[in-house]
Image (cartoon, rainbow, N blue to C red):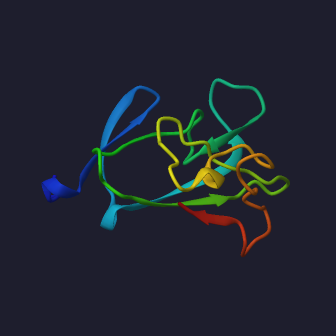
Amino acid sequence: YGMDMAMKKLLVIGGVATLFKISALSTSLIIRRQLIRGYEGERITVNGTSPGPVLRLQKGVEAVITVVNEIYDAASSIHWHGMTQRGTPFSDGAIGFTQCPITNVMGSNTMVY
């Protein structure tokens, strides 16, 4: 693969494991509405999949994840299943309850976790 072992990460999408490289332990998640084969109408996707990808990191590894909302007509958010939000409960999902929305206004449509 030509990748340094320390930089190899496992991404599981729809039950299929794929090795990918996170550059400097950072990655982006893009929220969109798009057509998906096998479904009628548009679906909300994260990086082209619905449900979104599973991100697996070793315990203690810190990652910088940039979430971009590309849904043209709605605000959005991400809920981090299995991740303790110690000290950052305002960064965990439910718009208006525990997190301000990631707007759909270009220029302010990203949130860095």
Q: Position of residue 101 (x, y in %)?
A: 76, 56
Q: Residue at x 75, y 57 (%)?
A: 100
Image point 60% across, 34% down: which residue? 50
- The residue nearer to you, when weighing 26 against 39, is 26
Q: To which quarter of the image does residue 109 belong?
A: bottom right
Residue 46 in the image: above or below residue 101: above
What is the total number of numbered labels drawn onto the structure image?
0
**How far from the left and from the top, in percent, is residue 15?**
41, 26
Indicate whether 79 appears above or below 68: above
Q: Please, which residue is most extreme toward the front here? A: 87
Q: Residue furthest bottom?
A: 107
Residue in the image at 71% along x and 48% along y: 98
| Residue 63 screen position, x and y as percent | 39, 58
- Place of residue 39 in the rendered image (x, y in percent of width and height, measured from the top left): 69, 25
User: At x 61% / y 50%, what residue is drawn?
Assistant: 89
Q: Is residue 2 left or right of residue 91?
A: left
Extreme right residue here?
73
2 versus 13 height, above or below = below
Indicate left or right for 99 with 48 as reference.
right
| Residue 45: quarter of image | top right
Determine whether, in the image, residue 9 is placed left or right of residue 36: left
